[in-house]
Amino acid sequence: MITPKPATDQILRILIILLFVLPISSNCYGQENLSKTPNFIIIFADDLGYGDLGTYGHPTIKTPHLDQMAAEGQKWTNFYVGASVCTPSRAALLTGRLPVRSGMASDVKRVLFPNSKYGLPSSEITLAEQLKKVGYSTACIGKWHLGHKEEYLPTNNGFDYYFGIPYSNDMDFVGDYKAYKEKKGNLPTENFNVPLMRNTEIIERPANQNTITKRYAEETIAYIKKNKDNPFFIYLAHNLPHIPLFASEDFLGKSKRGIYGDVVEEIDHGIGQIIAALKEEGLDKNTIVVFTSDNGPWLSYGINGGSAGLLKAGKGMTWEGGMREPCIFWSPTNIKPAVISELGTTMDLFPTFSALANVPMPKDRIMDGFDLSGTLFKNAPSPRKGVFYYRGTQLYAARLGDYKAHYITEGSYGQFGEKIVHPVPILYNLSVDPSENFDLGASQPEIISEINAMVKEHQSKLVKGKDQLMDIE
């Protein structure tokens, strides 16, 4: 005869389940927690360096909201952009392709200007166009820099709504250029006759850049609230901390890092407001937020520029400081918190978001991105094994695993020397020497051979697009 267990034993078993099993299940992460159409927000800074955030080691710039996102989400330490200057980097992010393929890279004009004739070709598929295939609402807020004419603006490239400036905030300069250089770009906002646009109309000229960071955050929050019942994609591309630097009265003079720190801290504050809005609307657990920057710091502007931390060089160059950027992925209960040292690039956002939104990838072109969802949700190894470092249309360096080979090195903006073609590539192990100080090329020719083989395979399939940046009016 079996003696029934006392009721107290049954209660104890239930308590054990509640205390131990349920907390474990509530801490499970994975994309299965997302809907079939999660929201996406990409926040893209301009000229922010690898070392300019608190979570990436800056001692005096306070970025509590980004630091919290990194703690709750994933902080990537080997994340790259498609180029070390504005226009090609933005083209790479939005198309998932190296800009040399689309013609958005040039050896003559490295970026688009207010007198440029062309912009992003209509044959390219932007991430906004990709997501609209499955019903997403799309907004571009901030700096565009892929063509200022109406046919090239965001509203003709898959975005339902646009609020921002069409190119860099230092263009349309109408002041004393000598004073501009002497003051390292810090002149009144009226010296820069940059237009602020809503959709295809200019609504303010010159744009009041003192308040523009604040207004970008407000526009983003308004779009979130307006579209909370539909899947949305927001591309928030700040035009700061690109020189010239501007901050609102609430932040001006508040950072120990000076005006540059003021700008970064105001961007961080706006991000905190956006995260708060997502939580208030109950959207945080169905939204993926990504923060990164378009290229490294503009070092020629001294203390008014940023810092690449322990990385070498900055904007305009193919050393690590020019193309490796801070990157944070955030989505509560979905993205598994971790520090990720695997390889990733902005071009990987296109296939990753496409997979999460169940949109088939284009079959009629070569794509350069990889789906990172396995790393984001399961901490699986990244499918990306290599990185190509282009300057204009020329391949200057390539990374395979831990190792990077430089075929050509060249400074920019009067720094880091003249152009040198290396008959024997200089080689660095970036895992142990991220500052690229110790050349291993002579001692490890077999590694160079492996990288050369990857480059040969890549170039055998490369068709360069017609230069869209060279022609001016």
Image (cartoon, grey):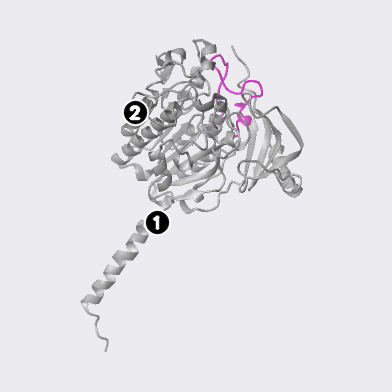
User: In this rendering, is residue 396 above or below 451?
Assistant: above
Classify residue 215 as left or right of residue 473: left
**Residue 203 in view of the camera:** yes
In the rendered structure, which amino acid carries the disc numbered 2? Glu
Q: What stretch is highlighted in magenta?
A: 97-125
Q: In which quarter of the image is the N terminus?
A: bottom left
User: In this rendering, is residue 65 above or below 401?
Assistant: above
> In the image shown, does 68 or 129 lie closer to the viewer?
68
Query: Which dot marks residue 10?
Result: none
Camera-nearest label, 2 or 1: 2
Q: Residue 219: x and y, percent?
A: 35, 27
> In the image shown, does 241 or 93 lie closer to the viewer?
241
Q: Do the residues labelled 2 and 1 touch (CB within 8 Å)?
A: no
Label count reads 2
User: In this rendering, is residue 163 above or below 473?
Assistant: below
- Please tell me which residue is depicted at 43% across the width and 44% down the height of the picture: 70
Q: Residue 352: x and y, percent?
A: 50, 43
Classify residue 268 as left or right of residue 309: left
Determine which residue is flagged by label 2. Answer: 218
- Please tell me which residue is depicted at 37% across the width and 56% down the height of the picture: 27
User: In this rendering, is residue 128 above or below 330?
Assistant: above
Q: Residue 261: x and y, percent?
A: 43, 30
**Residue 37 in view of the camera:** no
Determine which residue is flagged by label 1. Answer: 28
In the rendered structure, which amino acid carries the disc numbered 1? Cys
Q: How many other residues sit within 10 Å of disc 2, few (<14), some (14-19) or many (≥20)?
A: some
Q: First in sequence: mark 2 or mark 1?
A: 1
Magenta span: helix, strand or loop, mainly? loop
Q: Quadrant of the C terminus?
A: top right
Classify residue 205 as left or right of residue 392: left
